[in-house]
Image: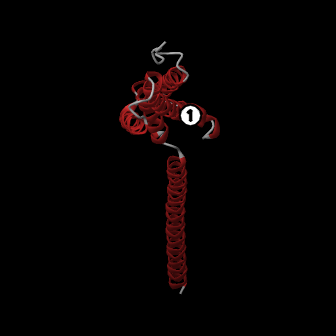
Amino acid sequence: MATKTAEGATGGTEAGTEARKDDETTTAGLAEEQTAEEQAAGEQVPEEAAEADGGEAGDATEAAGGKAPSGVGQGAGAVVSAALGLVSLSGGWIGTVASAREQLVGQLRTSSTASVATQIKEVYGDAWHTTALWAGLFALAALITGVVVLARPAFGTPGRPQAAWIKSVAWAGVSLGVIGLLLAVLKYSDALLGLPSTG
């Protein structure tokens, strides 16, 4: 009987030990699974945060790129100013046509019995003044366009400098405009290449 009791006690002890080992194994497995899940969640959060930050940075860059002026309009204005300045020095095709028309009108209005001074004034003088007038208009347009291009950065995006070539071309247009306007005034007032005297 004593032997059976001892064997029963030993069996119960072994069973209890095995049960405890099973419980410890189960607990350790659950703990490892929870740790793995936490690590996976921790890795996902920084990735999502990085993606969100990258998206916001990209949106900000796109917004900034969309609002930044390209300077194409200023460059075109500078080129137009220089072209108008060159035309003002030569009078241009419009000035030539207007001068020829004025000369024809003067011939039609002047009789053959008019004095030489009158014929020169009506036929050649008015035509010369018409050429000077159109040259002055082109010079004034070149001057105004160049000044507007040079003053544009003051009313645009702060901290964005104007391209050097735009400034150079605009200043060229302003200079040509000033020279053309001065020459036009001198020609129109007969101070430069005035009509010949008939006296």
Q: What is the three-letter code of the residue carrying label 1?
A: Ile
Circle 1 crowding by C-alpha within 10 Å: few under 14, some 14–19, many from 20:
some
Which residue occupies the foreground of this view, 28 or 34? 34
Which residue is at 51% across, 24% downward? Answer: 184
Query: What colour-coding does the image apply?
Result: secondary structure
Percent position of residue 160, x then y? 57, 35
Vertical order, 155 against 118 (above or below): below
Say which residue label 1 marks: 144
Which residue occupies the foreground of this view, 105 or 167? 105
Vertical order, 6 against 143 (above or below): below
Which residue occupies the foreground of this view, 10 or 116? 116
Left or right? Give the position of 10 relative to 95: right
Which residue is at 41% across, 30% downward? Answer: 113
Residue closest to the far front: 113
Percent position of residue 115, x then y? 45, 24
Q: Is mark 1 on a helix, strand or loop?
A: helix
